[in-house]
Structure formats: C-alpha cells, structure tokens
Amino acid sequence: MINICEVGPRDGLQNEKEIVSTADKVELINRLIKAGIKKIEAVSFVNPKVVPQMADAEQVMNSIPSHPEVSYSGLVLSRKGLDRALNTKIDTVNVVLAVSEQFNLKNARRSVKQSQEELVEVILETERAGRKPAGVLGTVFGCPYEGSVSIDKVFSIANSFIEAGCKEIVLADTTGMANPLQVKQVTESFVKAFGEEIELRLHFHNTRGLGLANTLAAYQAGVQSFDSSIAGLGGCPFAPKAVGNVCTEDMVNMFHRMSADTNLNLEELIKTSHWIENIIGRPLPGMVSKADCVKV
Amino acid sequence: MINICEVGPRDGLQNEKEIVSTADKVELINRLIKAGIKKIEAVSFVNPKVVPQMADAEQVMNSIPSHPEVSYSGLVLSRKGLDRALNTKIDTVNVVLAVSEQFNLKNARRSVKQSQEELVEVILETERAGRKPAGVLGTVFGCPYEGSVSIDKVFSIANSFIEAGCKEIVLADTTGMANPLQVKQVTESFVKAFGEEIELRLHFHNTRGLGLANTLAAYQAGVQSFDSSIAGLGGCPFAPKAVGNVCTEDMVNMFHRMSADTNLNLEELIKTSHWIENIIGRPLPGMVSKADCVKV
C-alpha cells in the first residue's frame, strides 16, 4: 500500500502570490479527505511576513474537521514555530532543515548546526507534548547554490533527529535536482543505515520533469511513502511548471496503472484538481486531469 | 550509449495548426544536428490534405544537408507514401501501423490487416530500393477507443515486418497510456521473442506525465533507443501539455544525470528548444529549458 501525504495546502500554496482565503484552504482539505487522503501537510508555522500565504495557519487548523483516520501535519523551522503549532490540534510536527548551508541560511536564517540543535530540542518538546515529530531534510539531492550535498551529512543529521525521537524521516528534493539512479542509491543507503522501522518518505519536485521517474526509482527501492501536491500546485507564475511538487493525481494514476494501491479515489482527486485550478485562476501543471479531453 | 531519434520535425510539428515555414523546419533540423543528433524523423509522406503541416516534405528533404553520420527518416502509411519517399534522399522509411483497429482506421483509413499487407510490400520495396525500413507499431500500450491491446497481435505484426526485412522495430505509446510496469513486461517479452539483433526503439508521449518514468523502465529493461521531441513539441493548443512527445532535452538531462551518455550537447538542445518555442509562439512543455531561471 502506497501512503501519500498531500502537501498542496502547504508546499503547494505557499508560493502563490495571491492569498487564497481561509475558507478555500479549508474546502481544499475537506475535498482531499473526501478523495481518501489520510495524511495532509495542512499549514506551516513560519514568519507570516516572509510567507504571508501561511499567516492563517491557526484559523485553518481551527476550521478543519477532526477525523480519527486523518493526520494533519504542520511545518516548523524553529522553537517559536513549535509554540504556535502546539496551540493547535496539529498531529505531526514536521521539523525542517535544509542540509546545505546556503539554502538553510536563506530558508531558516540559521546555520545548519544552529537549526539542527534547535530542532533536536523541538523534537524532544514535540514528544513531551504528545504529538508526533517528523524530520524533514531539504536539498538532500542537490542545492541550487552549492551543487552536490554530502550524503554523510544528510545521514548524520537524520541520525540526530531519530535519536531525539523521530520515527519518520522525509528526504526532500527541494528544487528538483534528483535523478533516479541517485534516488535508488540514497534510498538503499538510508534503509541500510537506519533499518525499516524508520518510515522513509520522499518528497520530489518536478522542476526538471523527473518527479515521477524519481518516485518510480524510490518505489522500486522499497519506499512506500511519498509527498505530493494536488494539481502539481507549487508552480511559480514567472516560470510555469518549473517548481511544482510532483502532482498527486498524476502519481496516483501511475501507481494505479501499475496495480499498486493507494486507497485513494482518482476521480475525486481529479475533480479537486479542477476545483483548485479554478480557485488559483491559471492552468496548473498536473497532466492526468487534462488528458481525458484528449483522445488521440 | 543511448541513441535518441529526434521526432520533433515530424511528430512534434504535425499537430501544429499554424504552418511552420520550410526554412524554419530546415533550420530546426540543422540546429538539432549541431547539438549532436544523428537520427532525425524529418518528414512524413502522408496526404497533405489531412496533415497540411507535412505538405512540404520533398522541399524539406531537398534543403537539409547530407551528413555521413546523420540518418533521416520519413513516415509512410502506404505504398503511395513510399513512392514519394523514394524520390527523396530519405535514409530510413518508417512504416507505421496502429495495432488497434479503430485507431488504424482513423489514422490510415485501412483495417489493420490491410495496412499490414500493404506495409509488408512497402518494406520489401524499401529494401530493394537500397533504403532501410523500420517498423513502427502505434497504440501498443493502449488505445483511447478500444482500451487494452493484445500483445500477441503486436508481436505477430512485428514478426511479419521483421520477416519482410525490418531490423528495427519501434513500439509507440501513441496517446500516453503506458505505465512503467507494462513497459518493463512488454520490453522483456519483445527481447525474448525477437532477440537482441532486432533494434527495439520506444516512443512515448507524455500525456499523463509518465514519459520519463516509462523511459526509465525501458532503460532498466535494457532498451537503449528512444524517440523524443525537442521542447516536448506535439502539444495541442486546446489541451496544453496533454499530448506532446517526451521532451528531448528533459530525457537527455535525465540520462546525463544518471551518467548514461547520449553523445548530445544539452546546452545546444536547450538553445534549440528556446528557438523553436519562439517560432511556435507559445510555451512548450519541456521543463529543463525553464528550470535554470528558477534557483529555489
């Protein structure tokens, strides 16, 4: 069984210049749940001046339904973010660190070491608060500023998060630099280093069109958990299709055609994709949702 | 070594409503050769009333340079098309048949059996004329009208083309219905049935975003020859990104990042992609060509 974590409401929307209303964010999440999504990165608890689209994180969390089977996660870069997260009903705290120095400095305004130390405390505190911590490592497959990234460094940080209590690690290809061979190698090394009791989730962007090829390579290497974004949300208005997350319904279509079950309703996902495209007001990168109108 | 056959000048352009000038087609081919392309599907010899974009096939063939290392192919659906092809300097005649009845009826106005009989004669005649025949089978991985396609039928037709003299067979996913598991199975069965002395080339469309995942699956199963289209040409104005061929520069980027050589110059391909996008006058589906302007 493939476990898909829908990140559209957070990673997908965060780069949109036009603010999506809280009501529409809540409707998006409700529609995703209707399609069978059980795991949703719903919000991020970051500086609203830097990411205004996520300023209503608390309101979103207050307005979405509590479902026994649905788990909500929120992104946290710091201790301050955790305090906000713990004041909501968030189930999982995604602590995020970019493994490359320059990227983390831009993203979190901290050195990697500073983020690592602060986030180890955040993980411990998350556990004490009875929530679930997940460690998310960004730029694992390459950094647009620094190029290649040391996999030893990735694993050393992953290890510190696991020792602090994370049972789930997400390796993220933040700017779509991964290739299938590298994904296979990194995935196999990870499982060898940390064993199968740590849930490994992969997070791909489709910047260079390799999102589904990388997903396939990870799946072949044994990974069953993936992040994706409805309609491929995450694109930048100035570079259409260039930075979106891998698209949920396209990924689900791939797995279903390969007879790998996701427990998701593809038709409902496509409806939701059309709906959010209408809200955003421009064509989004997802392809399956457009394919049915083309017969030959 | 990966062998890429560039099909942009034929499959890529044929659906474009606006006629691209002969001069621009010739410049496109020259630019592709400069990027290292050795195999080009340059034209098709079909009814110009049905495919007006290809009406200047003879002029294109007369205007492109003869290169000892570059091989030009042209698409032929019938005996009549062959006569036109043999009056040009075409190196390879791509005889095309869609394996599904309804699709072939629309595409070639013949039953599959009629096409098969006529094309076996075309293959024999191509050989007698000292040119190379290649057998192209369409809708191999599914038909939009009939659904799944019998692989026995595919192999039976392939066999008749091979017996007539084809040393190269192209299996085409005409409307992007293939999935990676199916590609692996079909490819492995093909090699088992016909051996490695028959060159197997795969032709994917990216209709559902699976073009590169399917390419990866075929590569893993041992295939080294692929069709692709510069900039992902082949999209339909009414369904952006929905029906294009898999994009040449995106495919080359994938292989290079996996340390699989193509003997192609990616930078020149990207320049050519930008150039043709400017000629066509709208954004084309290729992604690598847009990625460099997006750093994070």
Image: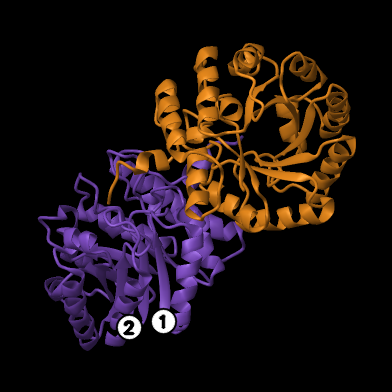
Chain colours: A orange, B purple
Check whether the beta carbons of the residues at disc 2 and disc 1 lie within 8 A of each other.
yes
The first of marks 2 and 1 along the sequence is 2
Count of picture labels? 2
- Give the amino acid at mark 1: Ile
Q: Position of residue B216 (x, y in %)?
A: 53, 60
Front-lying residue, A229 or B77: A229
Identify the subunit bearing mark 1: B
Q: Which residue is mark 2?
A: B162
Give the residue at x 31% y 39%.
B239
Asked which secondary structure carries label 2, the reply is: helix
Whether residue B136 sits left or right of residue A256 in the image: it is left
Asked which secondary structure carries label 1, the reply is: loop
Whether residue B182 sits left or right of residue A186 in the image: it is left
Q: Position of residue B112 (x, y in %)?
A: 21, 70
Q: Position of residue A193 (x, y in %)?
A: 83, 53
How would you rate the neighbour count of disc 1 (Cα within 10 Å): few for under 14, some for 14-19, many for 20 or more? some
Q: Which residue is mark 1?
A: B198
Whether residue A203 sits left or right of residue B178 in the image: it is right
- A153 relative to A58, above or below: below
Give the residue at x 78% y 17%.
A86
Give the residue at x 27% y 38%.
B238
